[in-house]
Image (spheres, grey):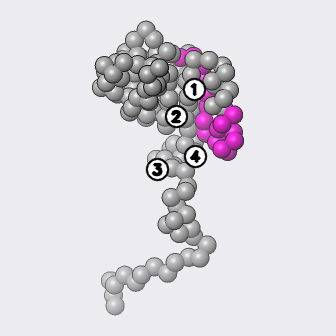
């Protein structure tokens, strides 16, 4: 029939839907696709020891190229300027003295990067950081 669409014959070399769910998420924009084909995350923690532990865990999971660690806000800014970063996880201690202003500044300068704050923060500060543009807050449990 003219104009009739026939069902597509499955290609045996093409992954099934169950396999597709295990692929890493990739950017759809062609300009970023050529620059950076994998999901990237920067984790900003207050100590070198914490950065090493995260790097070691990422390496064990086969994600050492996708997950970078830094131990100060200045190094975070360098990472964000050098490459497309999809997610930045930042400890509240490194966003001092004002994590709300820090979140606002990062979101305005790097709108393509999802910001997640973590660490010790009171509920009011956590809510203000989210209102300032962070995607979420991972609060440390009360001691």
**Which quadrant would residue 72 be assigned to in this image?**
top right
Residue that numbered label 1 is attached to: 79
Where residue 18 appears, as percent x and y from the top left, is 51, 65
Q: Secondary structure at mark 2?
A: loop
**Which quadrant would residue 76 be assigned to in this image?**
top right
| Between 11 and 89, the one nearer to me in the picture | 89
Residue that numbered label 2 is attached to: 85
Q: Residues within 10 Å of mark 3 (few under 14, many from 20)?
A: few
In the depicted structure, whether residue 64 falls above or below residue 117: below
Which image quarter holds the N terminus? bottom left
Mark 3 or mark 1, which is nearer the start of the sequence?
3
Q: Residues within 10 Å of mark 4 (few under 14, many from 20)?
A: some
Q: Is label 2 in contact with label 1 (beta carbons under 8 Å)? A: yes
Residue that numbered label 3 is attached to: 28
Q: Secondary structure at mark 4?
A: loop
| 2 within the magenta span | no
| Between 69 and 10, the one nearer to me in the picture | 69
Mark 2 or mark 3, which is nearer the start of the sequence?
3
Where residue 117 appears, as percent x and y from the top left, is 44, 26
**Which quadrant would residue 100 be assigned to in this image?**
top left
In the depicted structure, whether residue 61 falls above or below residue 52: below
Q: Is residue 131 left or right of residue 87?
A: left
Mark 4 or mark 3, which is nearer the start of the sequence?
3
| 67 within the magenta span | yes
Mark 2 or mark 4, which is nearer the start of the sequence?
4
């Amino acid at each position: 029939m003219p104009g009739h669409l026939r069902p597509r014959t499955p290609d045996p070399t093409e992954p099934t839907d169950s396999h597709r769910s295990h692929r890493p998420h990739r950017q759809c924009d062609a300009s970023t696709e050529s620059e950076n084909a994998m999901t990237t995350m920067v984790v900003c923690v207050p100590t070198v020891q914490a950065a090493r532990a995260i790097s070691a865990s990422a390496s064990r999971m086969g994600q050492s190229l996708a997950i970078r660690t830094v131990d100060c806000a200045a190094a975070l800014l360098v990472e964000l300027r050098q490459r497309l970063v999809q997610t930045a996880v930042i400890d509240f201690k490194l966003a001092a003295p004002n994590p709300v202003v820090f979140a606002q500044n990062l979101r305005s300068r790097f709108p393509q990067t999802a910001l997640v704050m973590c660490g010790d923060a009171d509920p009011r500060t956590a809510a203000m950081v989210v209102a300032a543009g962070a995607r979420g807050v991972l609060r440390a449990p009360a001691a």
